[in-house]
Image (tube, helix red, strand yellow):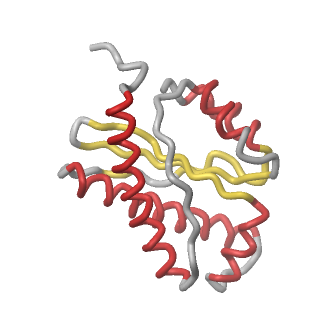
Amino acid sequence: MTQATSLREDQRDCLQEISNVAMGQAGDHLARLLDSFVILSVPHVAILTPAEIAMAVQAIDKDNVSGICQGFIGGGIAGEALLIFHDSEIDDVARLLNTQRDEGAQLEMLLDLASIIIGACLNGLSEQLNITLSQGHPLVLGQHCPIEDLIRINQRRWKR
């Protein structure tokens, strides 16, 4: 079986809307947890090569970031969710959660947040698609590094 290398416009629009609803649910969950307003952008859906992922995320910002991914599988779907935290915002989140600002506490906070955000998003996707998705443990891809390094170091892991 060959893998699709592109999406038709109607497929992309459908996946983008499903993703938008799921992200909205995750944002709502996070806002309630933090008792704070959460701003979300509309998700962009595409099938990308590792090089294309690198180009897309490098356009986001030049600040140092920390990246976490979490695999999921179920209903004939398998993938990884990638969550990127800007280091400039980690202190703000730690303050909202009354978390210590040492490195160990921040790492634990990032892993917990990733699990909450990705879990809520995957729940939203699975509910809309009427499937069950199982998720793995979050994995730290890198901390306090330029986004280019985060992607370059992990490119070998990704095919599409």
What is the x, y in percent for residue 78? 34, 37
Is 66 on the left-hand or right-hand side of 116? right
- Image point 67% across, 36% down: which residue? 151
Is 157 on the left-hand or right-hand side of 21? right
Is 40 on the left-hand or right-hand side of 25? right
- Image point 71% across, 45% down: which residue? 60
- Image point 32% across, 59% down: which residue? 124
- How many discs mark residues in the rendered view? 0
What is the x, y in percent for residue 58? 73, 38
What is the x, y in percent for residue 52? 61, 27
Image quadrant where one finds the N terminus: top left
Q: Nearer the viewer, residue 78 or 105?
A: 78
Relative vertical location of residue 5 with respect to residue 102 in this rendering, above or below: above
- Image point 58% across, 67% down: which residue? 39
Relative vertical location of residue 122 with respect to residue 112 in this rendering, above or below: above
Q: Nearer the viewer, residue 13 or 148?
A: 13
Is 118 on the left-hand or right-hand side of 40? left
Residue extending farthest left? 130
Relative vertical location of residue 156 with respect to residue 1 in this rendering, above or below: below
What is the x, y in percent for residue 4? 36, 20
Residue extending farthest top? 2
Q: Nearer the viewer, residue 101 or 27?
A: 27
